[in-house]
Image: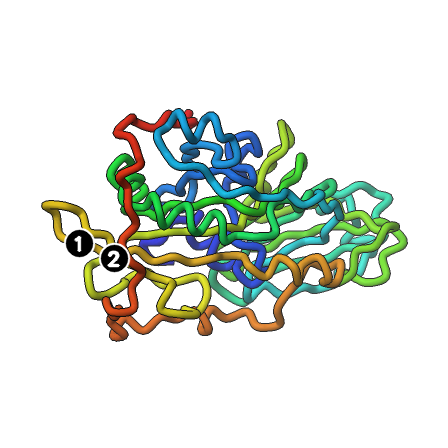
Amino acid sequence: MGSSSLAHTYRTAMRRHRFGYALYEPAPFARLRPGMLGYLDDAYQRWHPILDLTDPAVVQAAGYGPLRPVQRSPPDTRRYGPLTADKVTETSVEMNAGVGAGAVGLPVDVGGLVRYSTAGGFGAVLLCGDEVVSEGFDFRDPFSLWLQRHAKLLFARYPDAKRHGLCAVTWTYSSTDVGIATWENSEGSVTVGTHVGAAGVAKVGPEVSWVRGASSSGWSTWKDQKRVVFFAGVKIKSGLFGSLREEPEKNWRSAGDAFVVQDGENAPYTVSVEQFGDDWYHIRKAGEGGHIAAEDSDDSDDFDESDDFDESDAFDDFDDSDDSDNSANSDDE
């Protein structure tokens, strides 16, 4: 795993599901909900909220211009089966006298057992015990434009956000019963149970339920409140003038994905703009297993650092003259 944090490794390994950023420590929905502005720390572990962009009074009091009108979509609720990291294999376990449900920490009435493991290296399984609520805003342009307009002021007020990147949350996936298990070698594994009625381990229908069983490293569980397991949105991140060093979540789509900020006496710097988790509309049409794309590789997301950013293609600088110097009121706790 190198020097990467466990949260960063988990996030990377769960990108195959295309739900956006996967959180190793699911954040309370009250702190990370559609419309929130904030950032993840350098370990991609803890979410730091700043303010709710959909609350005009809060935005104005913080000294920012308003967000363009946005319409929230009705929540979509469904159950998902186990969501696994890349390179995790799934094996049906025959139940017999030697290997019963009780032996792997499951109720005796389960109808089947499934084991998840890896041949080597990192593995993870996310299993929510109740419905997953998918909700947010269909359109991201208002959030993207707001971030671009206020990038200079935001980065001046929040140096940590300038270093880690600043996110406007547009979509979340949350549950009130979350379980995450991870392991780091071939000896790690997780066993889950299915109640009678399952058509197959890859499908989850109305008559199917999954139960968390034994794990080589144990389950981390959250049942205290509604928590976000994935979120999508728009992210801005500063870079060196002339080039961008951050690997994007998606392929660059146009020169409009970056612009230059003139920072007074300091050196100008580029700001990258990326939308992440923007395959959410495919998710609602996907099979009940929750797997979105067949490919499990991040190769398509590679960014060639030798491709310098062309200043002539940059956005014009945004005028911050209408922003006051009042400090923003942070919601961070």
Q: Pointer 1: residues within 10 angstroms few (<14), some, or many (20+)? A: some
Query: Which residue is drawn at the image coordinates 18% and 47% (left, top)?
Result: 263
The answer to which quarter of the image holds residue 58 is: top left
Residue 320 placed where, x, y %? Answer: 28, 42
Name the residue tied to disc 1: 268
Query: Contact, CB < 8 Å: mark 2 with mark 1?
Result: yes
Query: Which residue is drawn at the image coordinates 20% and 65% (left, top)?
Result: 242
Which label belongs to residue 306? none
**Left or right: 305 with respect to 115?**
left
Q: Pointer 2: residues within 10 angstroms few (<14), some, or many (20+)? A: many
Query: Which residue is drawn at the image coordinates 24% and 52% (left, top)?
Result: 261
- Give the residue type that dot 2 points to: Val
**Left or right: 87 with respect to 319?**
right
- Give the residue type that dot 1 points to: Pro
Residue 105 visible in the picture:
no
Pointer 2 or 1: first along the chain: 2
Label 2 – label 1 distance at C-alpha: 7 Å
> Which element is circle 2 on?
strand
Using the image as rendered, state which of residue 22 and residue 254 is in the foreground: 254
> Which element is circle 1 on?
loop
**Relative vertical location of residue 180 with respect to residue 241 in this rendering, above or below:** above
**Relative vertical location of residue 265 with respect to residue 312 in this rendering, above or below:** above
Residue 319 visible in the picture:
yes
Name the residue tied to disc 2: 260
Looking at the rendered image, the quarter that the N terminus falls into is: bottom left
Using the image as rendered, state which of residue 183 and residue 85 is in the foreground: 85
Query: Which residue is drawn at the image coordinates 63% and 42% (left, top)?
Result: 72
Number of numbered discs on residues: 2
Using the image as rendered, state which of residue 212 and residue 163 is in the foreground: 163
